[in-house]
Image (cartoon, rainbow, N blue to C red):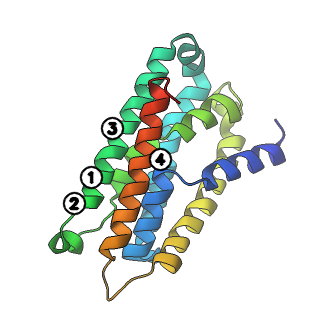
Amino acid sequence: MTAPAFIAAVFLLLLTPGPTNTLLAVAGGSAGFRRSLHLIAAEAAGYLLTIVPLATFAGPYLAAHPIAASAIKLCSAIWVLLLAARLWTISPAGIGAPLVTFRQVFITTVLNPKALIIGLVLLPHGSIQAMLPWLGLFLMIVLTVACLWLSSGAALIGRANGEFPPLLRRIAASLLLCFSAGLAGSSLGLI
């Protein structure tokens, strides 16, 4: 794959709405762009933790063991379901704490099916040294797309009197529920 093709494919994949992007938009809308910038490090670390082992050695294993790949998707679905439940049920008194944490973005990204696509399909396989230039490109794309989601959340969702509107929390929770159902369905072979 050429560098321009890699950049375009990864950019479009990461730009697609999903659980991590939903969390980033919620963070941007609830805490603001600048106060949410640290979440980009959580996303980058989560992706690297998943894609590097996939591209270096796990790809052949998962291809030979589809049940393991399905189990990973099912774990992802359960995690996203838990995030949706938390976002739906958070009380107005609990809003003082951040709606989205570093840990949530990190774990959600580690379990994100996009990481499987990047690590198994888009990223060239081989040694870590051979992958370093590609990983550098990947991290620049992550930074760019994460800033887009954070700023979109901050601009579109905004802040209503210093707090995140309950209706928007419920909409975001509903989106996460849909992502969870899609992941569960694909892990069970229903989708």
* Circles 1 and 2 in contact, beta carbons < 8 Å: yes
Rendered residue at 52%/43% (across/down): 47
Question: Quadrant of the rendered structure where residue 99 is?
Answer: bottom left
Q: Amino acid at mark 4?
A: Ala
Question: According to the image, label 3 marks what residue?
Answer: 78
Earlier-in-chain disc, 4 versus 3: 4
Amino acid marked by disc 2: Thr
Q: Residue at x 43, y 55 (%)?
A: 175
Q: Residue furthest left?
A: 93
Q: Which circle, 2 or 4, is nearer the viewer?
A: 2
| Foreground residue among 148 and 41 | 148
Q: Residue at x 23, y 69 (%)?
A: 97
- Mark 2 vs 3, N-terminal side: 3
Q: Residue at x 76, y 50 (%)?
A: 8
The mark found on residue 45 in the picture is 4
* Separation of marks 4 and 3 at Cα, in angstroms: 21 Å
Q: Amino acid at mark 1?
A: Ala
Q: Which mark is residue 89?
A: 2
**Whole-Å distance between the Cαs marked 1 and 2?**
6 Å
Cα separation, mark 3 vs mark 1, equals 11 Å
* Mark found first going from the N terminus, 3 or 1: 3
Residue 42, how many percent across, how many down?
Answer: 43, 53
Task: Decide which of 39, 22 is in the foreground and name it.
Answer: 22
| Residue 175 versus residue 191 in the image, above or below | below
**Relative image position of residue 183 (x, y in whole percent):** 46, 36
- The answer for how far apart the CA atoms under marks 2 and 3 are is 16 Å
Labelled pair 3, 1 in contact (Cβ < 8 Å): no
Decide: few, some or many residues near mark 2? Use Cα within 10 Å; few <14, some 14-19, many ≥20: few
Q: Amino acid at mark 3?
A: Ile
Disc 1: which residue: 85
